Image (cartoon, rainbow, N blue to C red):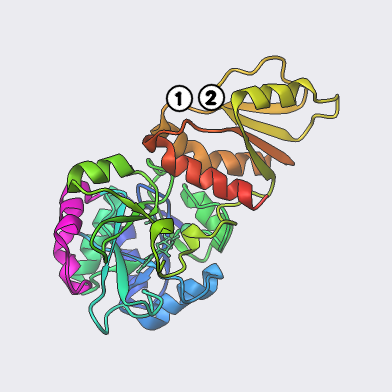
Amino acid sequence: MILNGQSPDAIAQAVQALSAGALIGLPTETVYGLAADAHRASAVAQIFSRKGRPSTHPLIVHVAGPDDVPRFAQAVPVFAQQLIDAFWPGPLTVILPRLAGVAEVAAGGHASVGLRCPSHPVAQALLLACREAGMAGLAAPSANRFGQVSPTTAEHVREAFGDELLVLDGGACAVGIESTIVDCTRSAPVLLRPGGISRTQIEQVTGLAVLDREALATPDPQAPGTLLAHYAPKAKLRLMDAKALQTALDVLGPDAAHIAIWSRSTLTTPAKGVTVRPMPAQAAQAAQQLFATLRDFDHLGARLIWVETPPPDAAWEGVSDRLQRAAASA
Ligand code: TXA
Ligand code: MG
């Protein structure tokens, strides 16, 4: 059932459900999560089974604040602390060496742990209430089935997991794509997944060059966010520049139905039956609308989704990454 996340009663119910070992739907500023007490192995195991996710793919542990980091991490390198100080609460996950014996199942058995402190007021209220109740962290992946588009509203979570799941409604997510993930277990930050915090911001705060996952000799561990066929809408998605889009439209015959387009450029004489949605000119707005737009296109029954290639700058890296993955599974 969906409950208003701003109500203290709803928060109390969610804490109770979590302490009883149940899962809940959690709003964050990035996407909604499917949460469980990070310390309770049986509850965390349910996340993997309900999501259909392999149990070796580690989950992010959400904490109320930086004070909770020492409960999970063995050590915090200087550059990781700089990132935490600069971007928490917010859309940044840091991967740190894990304290032995802690949140083993959530970490998928890996020697590291991903930690994030979300800024969404409902997530904050819940995490503080959980801490009071003796639960220091919530393990939560995005609340979608494995490989599908991430949820940005409470309704999306209900569609995926049904009405039995308690979902705290926190409105539409402001960031709209998952957090930036930075591996802090090596001597320099490694960008595992681009998101709301850009590579440029990370470099400014740490004074270090950000490495790419591909540049590593021993990439570890296989992260689902890095699988190509991820974030897939049902329709086939293609990325094209404005010129190619216009050309494709120009040669469409009369049977152009079931094509949906998301573009920043204005396209002329779109054929009848083609749905065109404007992509915002700002990366942050485009990110906010991305997953909901793909879902809308699916609901409209689009057979093909054509998206204008985003600009190549750092601010657009998260959006480009999700679109490339969606296109790769087409
Ligand atoms: O914005 C977000 O991060 C959302 C919200 C709910 O907080 N969560 C999210 O979780 O996107 P999920 O499980 O869908 O993606 C988590 C990513 C995966 O790619 C996972 O492999 C990676 O984080 N990850 C988690 N712990 C890790 C670790 N110890 N080492 C490497 N990657 C890790
Ligand atoms: Mg996910």
* Dominant secondary structure (helix, strand or loop) of the stretch shown in magenta: helix
Locate residue 19 relative to residue 289 in the image: left or right.
Answer: left
Residue found at x 25% / y 63%: 63
Q: Are marks 2 and 1 in contact (CB under 8 Å)?
A: yes
Q: Look at mark 1 in the image and give the residue it sits on.
A: 281
Residue 320, percent from left and from top: 49, 41
Which residue is at the far right? Answer: 254
Mark 1 residue type: Ala
Percent of width and height locating residue 298: 66, 44
Q: Is residue 69 magenta?
A: yes
Q: Residue furthest top?
A: 268
Q: Is residue 51 magenta?
A: no
Q: Which residue is mark 2?
A: 264
Secondary structure category for the residue under label 1: loop
Does 256 sit left or right of 113 as displayed? right
Q: Position of residue 314 (x, y in %)?
A: 37, 37
Name the residue furthest bottom. 101
Q: Which residue is nearer to you in this view: 156 or 279?
A: 279
Few, some or many residues within 10 Å of mark 1 (<14, 14–19, 20+): few
Check disc 2 and report its element: helix, strand or loop: loop
Is residue 302 among what the camera can see? no
Above or below 261: residue 171: below
- The quarter of the picture where residue 175 lies is top left
Per the rendering, the mark at residue 101 is none
Residue at 19% over, 54% down: 84
| Span shown in magenta | 65-89
Give the distance between the C-alpha atoms of the residues marked 2 and 1, in whole angstroms.
Answer: 6 Å
